[in-house]
Image: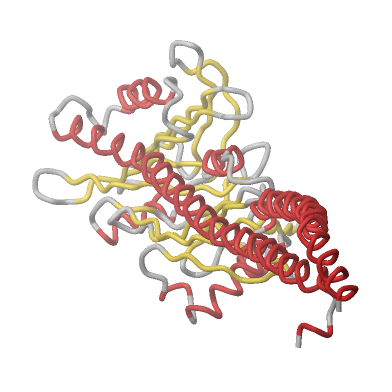
Amino acid sequence: MFSKFPLKTVLIVPFILQIVSAVGLVGYFSFTNGRQTVDTLANQLTKEISTRIEQHVLSYLNKSYQVLRVTNDAIEGGNLDVNNFGAMRAYFWQIIKEGDLESDLFFGNEQGEFIGVELNPDNGEIIFRIRTIATQPVREIYRLDSRGNAEEFVKVKEYDPRIRPWYQVAKKLGQPTWSSIYAAFSRANTSLDISAVRPIFNSTGQLIGVLANQTSLTRITEFLKNLNISPNGQSFIMERSGDLVVSSQISQPFLTIEFGKKKKIKRLQAIDSDSITVSSTAKHLQKEFGNFDEIEGSKQINFPIDGEWYYASIMPVRDGKVIDWLVVVVVPENDFMEKINTNTKNTILFSLAALIVAILIGIVTTNWISQPILQLNSAAKEIA
């Protein structure tokens, strides 16, 4: 069979085929191993980021619970009198002015009286609000000075704490809990807030009133934005209902609807988000699990968005009381594949260069080996 081919061809072709096969296998395994490395790195990264977010959220929200617990201990220990609004104002101001506690600390009682101290994050001012039997049905709002004294009257506003959702949920459950998420229109920029609430009882178990700490979710948004995930990675938190809580890419996860001088918000569903990454991820989760209530424990998935593959980690955030949110971290495959593709390309180029060098060496070696054989063959033919 091989007698039909020249000797040089018989010697060099198998050699070249071996080199080409080796180069092809090197390139294939380089790319395959690169993809496996990407899968491992992406899953590790998204899970680690999800865990960091979960820990931060629980730590941040726990501050509110701890402040209410300490305040309740002071009341039960007789160190703070809920009927002495002057002492309550001084106590609240002392906590708020430290700046560690976000937003607003307040108390309302069964008589409709109210006292609250709030740090305005827009200008750093501390506001004092009070409603007594004498001022009802309105509460008076004052600006406090550097010593916590009422410095300037700001305005009055009709208000009854007993009909507010934060008061009613604490009264209904009779134990520390969280309010539902709601809009805070009092600041320069409307934000979503949530209040930790704690009912206060007298020695006979009768409800006196409710302590609350209003916490802005803006701080969590800032935390998400500052996370170094990947060049195009995103993170967001949503409730089991699908409503967005916060997002690294969406400053206001809600719609503001105006009725004349009044404003109302409509919570934004993750699947309706303007962010293609957020909405597509939420839709895929719905398709994968049926509904968000079915997601238990940490999950990791990958899926396509407009032809590009993404990795996502989903982790529940629970405080053991009411909070039951889902943390989602999403990164595109290309954020990792760019370097892998570059490495694979370099490997193939180096392999091709090695192939060319090997072929040249093979040709030279073949000539060196075949030349004496050809000369011998020629001499044999002449003798014959």
Residue at the far bottom: name it.
1
Residue 266 appears in the figure: no
Residue at the far left: name it.
204
Residue 62 location (% of width, % of height): 34, 41
Residue at the far front: name it.
383
Residue 124 location (% of width, % of height): 57, 22
Residue sitting nearer the eye, 127 or 155 = 127
Residue 162 appears in the figure: yes
Please give left or right for residue 382 compared with residue 252 in the image.
right
- Please tell me whether residue 57 is drawn above or below residue 282 in the rendered image: above
Quarter the C terminus occupies = bottom right
- Please tell me whether residue 73 is drawn above or below residue 374 in the rendered image: above
**Which of the 4 image quarters holds residue 344?**
bottom right
Residue at 35%, 56% (x, y): give it: 318
Residue at 54%, 73% (x, y): give it: 285
Please give left or right for residue 280 compared with residue 179 in the image.
right
Residue 104 location (% of width, % of height): 45, 35
Residue at 67%, 55% (x, y): give it: 337
Residue 24 location (% of width, % of height): 69, 65
Residue at 83%, 60% (x, y): give it: 371
